[in-house]
Amino acid sequence: MRQDEMTPVVKTIAAILFPLIIIFSFYVIMHGHLTPGGGFQGGAIGASAIVMLIAAYGAKYVRERAKEENLSIFESIGGIVFVLVGLLGFLATSAFLYNFLVGEPLFGTIPPFGSNSGILNSGGILPILNIAVGMKVIGGLASVVLVMALAGGDEE
């Protein structure tokens, strides 16, 4: 074992925490229209899970499993989804990002007047936009940190 390598305990804990952090990231992204959070905050949480793997296993290990090209594709899909949702709103009413899903059963349930217990499918296009932004943030931040870690000499 190299001197700068993490112990098996750190690697095991990182492997256990990784899926839990990703699940929490998805929770924050999906509830962004109801609670504080959203695509950026949830994406930053998801990217921190990848940063944790870089710290525990090293940049070379993470680069072999989550290639920079795959992170770039993931980020690009998020951007494409955001623009497509915006264009669909434009096609529906001549307004970019028009909330065309209001009143639809999937994401457009109109909540009752008064206190709302948190109806998840009441955001219209917002949950879709939060997912797109989360994808952009996870892909972008993870790529930046991975490139910086590889440039730091952990490549060997």
Image (cartoon, rainbow, N blue to C red):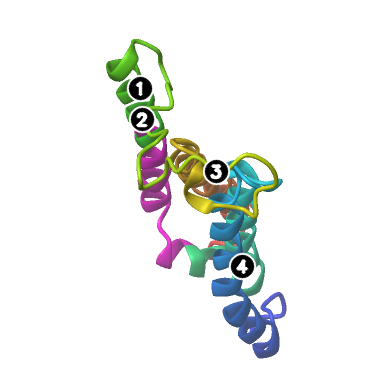
Mark earlier in primary sequence (4, 2) = 4
Occupied quadrant, residue 5: bottom right
Give the structural element (helix, strand or loop) at label 4: helix
Mark earlier in primary sequence (1, 3) = 1
Report the residue marked by disc 4.
21
Occupied quadrant, residue 77: top left
Q: Is residue 145 visible?
A: no
Dots 1 and 2: beta carbons under 8 Å?
yes
Q: Main secondary structure of the magenta part?
A: helix
59 or 153, which is in the foreground?
A: 59
Mark pair 3, 2: CA separation = 22 Å
Q: Which mark is residue 111?
A: 3
Q: Mark 1, residues whose alpha carbon is within 10 Å: few (<14), some, or many (≥20)? A: some
Give the structural element (helix, strand or loop) at label 2: helix
Q: Mark 2, residues whose alpha carbon is within 10 Å: few (<14), some, or many (≥20)? A: many
Q: Which mark is residue 85?
A: 2
Give the structural element (helix, strand or loop) at label 1: helix
Report the residue marked by disc 1.
89
Q: Is residue 64 magenta?
A: yes
Which kind of residue does numbered mark 2 sit on?
Answer: Val
Mark pair 4, 2: CA separation = 27 Å
Residue 153 horizontal/vertical position (percent): 62, 57
Q: Is residue 111 visible?
A: yes
Range of residues picked out in magenta: 63-80
Q: Is residue 46 magenta?
A: no
Q: Mark 3, residues whose alpha carbon is within 10 Å: few (<14), some, or many (≥20)? A: some
Mark pair 4, 3: CA separation = 30 Å
Residue at horizontal 69 percent and vertical 82 percent from the top: 10
